[in-house]
Image (cartoon, grey):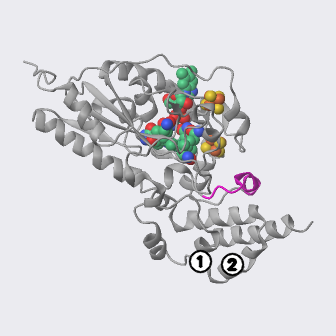
Amino acid sequence: MLYNQFMTLDPAKLRKFIEDQGWSGFGIVPISEVKSALGKHESIFEKWLRQGFQAKMVYLEAMKEDRYHPENKLPDVRSVIVLQAWYGSDENGNVARYARGKDYHKVLKKRLLSLSDWLKAQNPEISTYASVDSGPTVDRVLAEAAGLGFFGKNANLISPSSGSYFFIASLMTTAQLPATEKKRMPGCGDCQKCMMSCPMGAIVAPRVIDARRCIAYLTIENKEGIPEYLRPRIGNRLFACDICQEVCPFNEGRAGKQEILIDELNAKNGVGDNLDLAEILAIETDEEFQERFSGTSLMRAKRRGLLRNACVVAGNRGDKSLIPVLEQFLELETDEMLKEHAKWAIKAINQNTAI
Ligand code: B12
Ligand code: SF4
Ligand code: SF4
């Protein structure tokens, strides 16, 4: 007989536990609805891959079977709890908002696992599968299916009441939980602000991002040099990019006003809004880098990636005081890719300030 794991769980208690954990919101969706949404999105993803828009993120294709078939990871999955964690901030800076606090993967995974423990304590027969970003889940599709928002033309999932500056985490469970209510979503209407504002032309069609041109890809996931013709368009963005969210009317007036309920995600507990280029360019070893950025999302770029980005931003800034810093860097650095970027930066600063 199929054990009805719903009977033993009090939905009000579940809601209270989730709220006490500090999530900004959540939705619960039956697996049938998740599978139907994933079915539609699988072909969107396949087309995206065929167009080469995944750049070198080969892991996305490698995980395809598990991402679009959740039962591969959790046989008998019945419901998915999809959770939002707000990270917004008013301040503009050279580090994208999501990366300013502690690494969200670690912070949110810990909370998911304690939610899982709580569920299992209610009923030991329950099994779960927890995922935040790096796992084999299609997070925006799960969040849309759970009623947390709609797909903006910038591809981000937007909540009509709180905008798009939130992380998505999910807990699949064999428990059959009552689905949460879904509201009607407004959608973008005629607005095209994000598409017009992306400096890279990376939003190639509504909801379609060419990662090869996206600053988030170029400054984090990309392990090579940044193509020279794209460097000036990166501007001051040292790590990732928020432009297509900054211009979005759904984020207007919300960043900074909405409370960050999970304190570790706050900039003051991590990297901060802005990093000093001279300080970054003075990081000589991987060990020094690790000491400075351990526990933050910047670890993903490694020293090599972040210093490459720092050269690009230095060149774009046209600040002559950075020339001696770059020259010193060139003297000590052995990595050819980094040296080429530093030389480019010196040339760009001289050209920018020549008039
Ligand atoms: C790979 C990846 C990236 C890549 C590729 C970006 C991309 N758009 O795919 C790069 C490194 C560039 C990136 C950048 C960013 N990312 Co990212 N990324 C991911 C990851 C790991 C997978 C995304 C994926 O599956 N892409 C495949 C393509 C096909 O999907 P998609 O672009 O999301 O497109 C969806 C919609 O556009 C829509 N869609 C597209 N076409 C159509 C057409 C129709 C008709 C319809 C109905 C829908 C539709 O369906 C698509 C999904 O099937 C997810 C985490 C996860 N495990 O899911 C995080 C994730 C999407 N990223 C996230 C964030 C925060 C970002 C950045 C904002 C970070 C930053 N500040 O720089 C930027 C935003 C760039 C952008 N405008 O999308 C969050 C998004 C939260 C939210 N509120 O939406 C996620 C969910 C991580 C998380 N768990 O919180 N990211
Ligand atoms: S994150 Fe930046 S580069 Fe990427 S699509 Fe948005 S505006 Fe364009
Ligand atoms: S800027 Fe406009 S078009 Fe882009 S996601 Fe926001 S509402 Fe949609």
Q: Residue at x 53, y 48 (%)?
A: 89
Q: Residue at x 70, y 67 (%)?
A: 341
Q: Secondary structure at mark 1?
A: loop
Camera sees residue 32: yes
Q: Quadrant of residue 199?
A: top right
Looking at numbered disc 2 in the image, what kind of residue is underneath it?
Val
Q: Residue at x 80, y 65 (%)?
A: 348
Q: Nearer the viewer, residue 120 or 44?
A: 120
The answer to whether the residue labelled 1 contacts the one labelled 2, judged by CB atoms less than 8 Å apart, is yes
Say whether residue 355 is left or right of residue 326. Answer: right
Say whether residue 340 is left or right of residue 168. Answer: right
Q: Residues within 10 Å of mark 1 (few under 14, many from 20)?
A: some
Q: Nearer the viewer, residue 88 or 27?
A: 88
C-alpha separation, residue under disc 1 versus residue under disc 2? 8 Å
**How far across and down, in percent of the image, does residue 195 sit?**
69, 33
Mark 1 lies on residue: 282
**Is 197 above or below relative to 355?**
above
Q: Which mark is residue 325?
A: 2
Magenta residues (range)? 228-238
Q: Quadrant of residue 116?
A: top left
Instruction: Name the quadrant of the N terminus.
Output: top left
